[in-house]
Image (tube, rainbow, N blue to C red):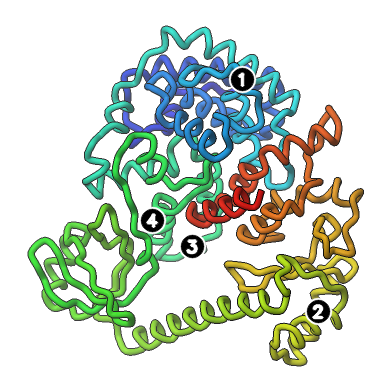
Amino acid sequence: MKKIFPIDWKKMHPGHAPMSTDFYYTQLANKVLRVLVDDGFGEILEEADRARDAAVRLTAWFEDLCNGGRLWGLVNDVCNERHGKPLPFYDTSKYNPGEPNLQDITLLLWDIIQSQFDDRVINPENPALMMAAMHLYDIFDEEYETAPETDEMIAFLNNPALGSDYWQARKAMEWFALGSYLSLRTNIHFDNEVSNITDDEDKDVIIYHLLLSHAFNDTHNLLALTASEWLSKAYGHRMELDKTMTKSRLYDIVALHGDTVLVRDSLNGKEVSLETESFDPEWAKRHLPSAKQILCNIIGLNGKYYQFWAMMTNPGEKVVSDYKKRRAQEETERDNVKYTAEMFEKASEGKPVVFVKGVDEYMDFQTKKMGSKVSDDFRRETERYLREDAEDGMVALMRSDEAGLLSIMSGIPAIKAPNNPYYDEAYARDNALIFIVDPQIIDYSSLCTLISHNYLPDAAVNSLQGYEHGRDLVQQNIQFLVDYYFAQHNTSTRSSSQNAKINSK
């Protein structure tokens, strides 16, 4: 078993800088690692590096707790707000916020393990998981009263400049999204994205853009919150991001005003003042005075706007023409999504889900009820999809915020809707969970529609205590599970869908 060294511990901290408590927490992380290995998690996590990483993350959670527990305290606050209890899954009747709790360790260990397996659902009550959590609790409980605070981390996270200084706020967001103990799933996604980049001269630029994208947008964590949301809620910083312009857009330069540049969107006419401090100084000196147009990405922080990633100056006619065509196509696609959703709502006669079987019923609904025009090629492609992807030709049609109309071709007998003639309780007991844990089957908005109408009441995890217990565990924590497994969706979408669920009760 390879030990954890200070260099491994420092990777979980901003800038990987030395801190006053490195030796203590590195030693503690090695104790945690020995428990994980002795309890069999070295084999479960498959690779030695993963076990060491898990030990470091668990120890960093404990360090956070010793520093005041503000990051983990937000888990309690948000779960109380959303779900009426400080944590999902576990009995919290004897829970002590701000102190080490067995439930905390079990949930974090579950998240660490679940994050590394796309092909299975880990039961939060898995006996091996809970046994390891008990052994870890003994270590942390014994250390809690004497464990040192890390003054450098307290100062970093309490820095008032995080609410006013773009660069310091961005540094904190980058750390939280990719360097904190809560960032494992983000790290996995980031590493997969980097590994898929072909070797070319722009690789470093693309990686840099991916890093910023995760820092601003990523929600692959327990609460499905962005880094700015988590940090601002936990520490009281004002870190309000305006991400409406983060896509690369073409802007006309209107005027220079000292520290800002007034630019106007070339298509919609929206004007915004960019902070020149976000420009490369050498570029600004050489090109800004003569620039007429720029193609760039913009992010807003607390009412001020900054350019980030790459920027093209005075793009040529072909670049401008291609840009306008691309934006026009995106507008058309958005209009089509909205129109298709409206047509489905009319055709479905108020039913949230419509069930059909076979290509003839599918086409009848599309053409006769929705009024869609379909080509012979579309019909042939639909026949192929139904033959290859749909179970016995069954399809569930739903309104989708992402696609307008969603055709679900898996798990249809698991949907307990009054108008589903294919519902099968035995099938549903074994398969309904797949809707909640697999974003490849259904999009977030459509899944929340199923939940709001209680169309997945049979969804359950396998439990040694029997099906009924496994079902209760899922049903009592269903919104947490949906948000967790579909964490790439933004909080505004999640909140509105969750409100629909609550209001339908």
Residue type indicated by callout 2: Tyr
Q: Nearer the viewer, residue 205 or 155?
A: 155
Q: Secondary structure at mark 4?
A: helix
Separation of residues labelled 1 and 2 (CA atoms):
51 Å
- Looking at the rendered image, the disc whose residue lies closer to the viewer, 2 or 3, is 2
Q: Residue at x 53, y 80 (%)?
A: 333
How busy is the neighbourhood of tag 3: few (under 14 within 10 Å), some, or many (20 plus)? few
Separation of residues labelled 4 and 3 (CA atoms):
15 Å
How busy is the neighbourhood of tag 1: few (under 14 within 10 Å), some, or many (20 plus)? few
Q: Nearer the viewer, residue 341 or 217?
A: 341
Q: Is residue 193 visible?
A: no
Q: Secondary structure at mark 1?
A: loop
Separation of residues labelled 2 and 3 (CA atoms):
44 Å
Q: Is residue 436 visible?
A: yes
How busy is the neighbourhood of tag 4: few (under 14 within 10 Å), some, or many (20 plus)? few
- Quarter of the figure with the N terminus: top right
Q: Residue at x 57, y 76 (%)?
A: 337
How busy is the neighbourhood of tag 2: few (under 14 within 10 Å), some, or many (20 plus)? many
Q: In this figure, which residue is indicated by the disc labeled 3? A: 199
Of label 2 and label 3, which has the lower sequence position? 3
Q: In this figure, which residue is indicated by the disc labeled 1? A: 93
Residue type indicated by callout 4: Tyr
Of label 1 and label 4, which has the lower sequence position? 1
Residue type indicated by callout 3: Asp
Q: In this figure, which residue is indicated by the disc labeled 4? A: 208
Q: Residue at x 71, y 60 (%)?
A: 441
Residue type indicated by callout 1: Ser
Separation of residues labelled 3 and 1 (CA atoms):
54 Å
Query: x and y percent of residue 126 in the render?
Result: 74, 28
* Label 4 with label 2: CB-CB less than 8 Å: no
